[in-house]
Image (cartoon, rainbow, N blue to C red):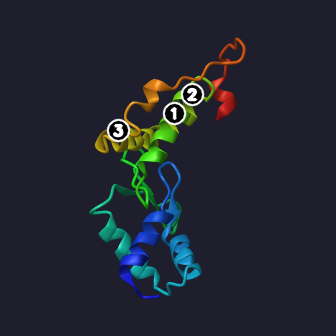
Amino acid sequence: MSDPSLRMLLLLQSIPREPRFISSHDLRSRMEDSGFSVSLRTIQRDLSALSTHFPLIQNEPQGRGKVGVGWAFSRDSQRTAFPGMSTATALTLSMAVQHLQPLLPPQVLQHLQPLQQEADEQLTKHNSAKYQDWMHKVRVAPHHFLQAPQIDAEAVE
């Protein structure tokens, strides 16, 4: 395949969120696995061009040969999902996070925060009567009395 638009979309889908990074070499391998035969330099140019429009960051090169440069979406950036989140997905995610909040460790909740923000924006933007008040109409009642677990932050890491 040689369509640059599809190649760039695939690149964006392959880039993780900080603190994980992916190297240009690994991105090139993923491109080849998907049927795009491009040079490493082309991948680097694409990443440079995409970083002007998307919140992409590079980690610092490490070691003698300055290898290990990786790319990631900024930790605080708005999540850009491809394709965009539907209203039904946004409602499901919001209700799941609301229900699981006392059960999940803070690190997991922090990781879900960009998705939660995207879901909230989606529900606000598409003020659909079908989903508008659903979160206020439904509550989950526990079958028995439970106490929230005490989770040691060091045990999760």
Q: Rounded to the nearest whole Å, what is the CA distance between mark 2 and mark 3?
A: 22 Å
- Residue labelled with disc 1: 95
Image quadrant assignment for residue 84 = bottom left
In this picture, is 136 found above or below 113?
above
Q: Rounded to the nearest whole Å, what is the CA distance between mark 1 and mark 2?
A: 6 Å
Q: Determine whether label 1 and label 2 are within 8 Å by CB.
A: yes
The kind of residue on which mark 3 rests is Ala
Question: Relative to 115, is 49 on the left or the right?
Answer: left
The kind of residue on which mark 1 rests is Met
In this picture, is 88 found above or below 147?
below
- Residue labelled with disc 2: 99
List x then y, in percent, for residue 29: 57, 77
Q: Which residue is at a point 51% across and 69% down the rendered structure image?
A: 65
Residue 69 is at least partly visible in this image: no
Q: Mark 1, residues whose alpha carbon is within 10 Å: few (<14), some, or many (≥20)?
A: some
Q: Rounded to the nearest whole Å, what is the CA distance between mark 3 and mark 1?
A: 17 Å
Q: Mark 3, residues whose alpha carbon is within 10 Å: few (<14), some, or many (≥20)?
A: few
Which of the two discs, 2 and 3, sits closer to the camera?
3
Mark 2: secondary structure: helix
Mark 3: secondary structure: loop
Tell me which numbered mark, 2 or 3, is placed earlier along the sequence: 2
Residue 6 is at least partly visible in this image: yes
